[in-house]
Amino acid sequence: MSLHDDMVAIGQRSLAASRELVTLKVRKKNAILLAMADELETHREAIQAANAIDIEEGRNAGLSDAMLDRLLLTDVRIDGMIKGLQAVASLKDPIGTKISRWIRPNGLEIIKQRVPIGVIGIIYESRPNVTADSAALCFKTSNAVILRGGKEAVHSNAAIADALIEGGGKKGMPEYAIQLIRTTDREAVKELVQLDGMVDLVIPRGGEALIRAVTEMSHVPVIKHYKGVCNLYIDAEADTEMALGIAVNAKCQRPGVCNAIETLLIHEAIAPEFLPQVAVLLEENGVEMRGDEAARAMVSGMKEATEADWHEEYLDLILAIRVVGSVAEAIDHINTYGSRHSDAIVTESDAASRAFLRDVDSSTVYVNASTRFTDGAEFGMGAEIGISTDKLHARGPMALEELTTYKYLVYGKGQIRS
């Protein structure tokens, strides 16, 4: 059987599974999710052994330390996957929720109700925990899911998927509700995104090149998560200690993720005091700083930032730094160079925070908090399917509600249109 035929078969099986999933009661779905969580615990050693193979192969292939960190499955991260499944099971099921209801003058009762999207394809790189998060959220919302991870995590993804399928099967999960594409052939991605009529939505998670390639190839709708060029602006009226803590956390706590900051903007009034202090802390954490002329004048040895640096998603311990003259200039920089992901201001000024929240065109905007909180679990969503930088049909962290669509239920008593 050819790759094309294999992919068509996967699509057909998912389509059939999606029609079974809509019949499952909430209690049964939750029992299946908890069984998946238990099976991850049972398979912990097998998952870590598979992950060790991926780490070794990644190291031999020259993956960066940041990429290896994204790939690594520690006990804490496996615990996180298990807790994520349990959390999703505990969340309210949006399927069947009435969004709105009204009665027309002719007596027709119209109900707008949440329903599953159907079959969702998830294409992702590096982070194997996405296998569990995506499967849990899609299953909870009665969507069948086709998972296609990157070749760097092929063993880890297979071990996780096997545990989920085995655990779910024990409690009656419909067959093929969760499918993993196990080939590393890149053509499989093209085949997946062209399964029009079988796949209803594709969500790519990974580097900008992957997302643009998927968007160009796809015959089905795509929700895009472009690069995370996140900015932190330190206002003239910022609390310095707070700003230092947020800046270091937002850059250094986990630099290889999309919600870490890549650019630090500092108001010129506070920069002479703040910039040398934050530079010491950043250097202690191994951060390479690249600054504009004003920033370099305040910190010796700082590299020169080029125009390209303001656009760059480093996913590493590198930070671009710029001194600005106002909150308006900071907002203009973010809307020009940012990626509409997550941006933050540190300020004690109500006027500055209001302007920042209103005018920054990003999915998530913070006042006095780290951008590292842009995450489904941190938002209380249990887990996330990704962080959309689109505006339709989802924006920001995508969880249960974002994996639904709606339909209209119309009740009549014999009405006809004249």
Image: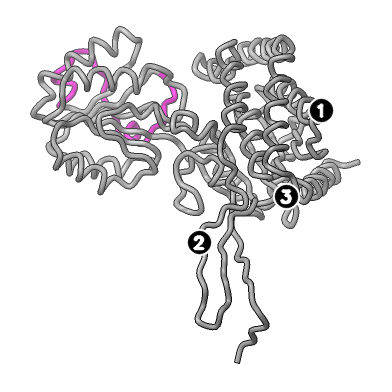
Where's residue 100, x and y in %?
Answer: 50, 61
Decide which of tag 3 and tag 2 comes sooner along the chain: 3
Note whether 176 is above or below 283 in the view shown.
below
Query: Does the magenta segment cover residue 232?
Result: no
Callout 2 secondary element: strand
Magenta span contains residue 308: yes
Q: Secondary structure at mark 1?
A: helix
Q: What is the CA distance from the residue labelled 3 to the residue labelled 2? A: 21 Å
Residue sitting nearer the eye, 342 or 288: 342
Q: Residue at x 39, y 26 (%)?
A: 372
The tag on residue 170 is: 1
Q: Residue at x 69, y 51 (%)?
A: 118
In the image: residue 106, left or right of residue 149: left
Q: Which residue is mark 2?
A: 100
* Structural distance between the alpha carbons of marks 3 and 1: 19 Å
Outermost residue, bottom side: 418
- Label 3 belongs to which residue? 22
Q: Three-letter amino acid code at disc 1? A: Lys
Q: Quadrant of residue 350?
A: top left
Q: As shown in the figure, which amino acid type bears the numbered disc 3?
A: Val
Mark nearer the viewer, 3 or 2: 2
Q: Which residues are magenta?
A: 294-316
Name the image quarter holding residue 263: top left
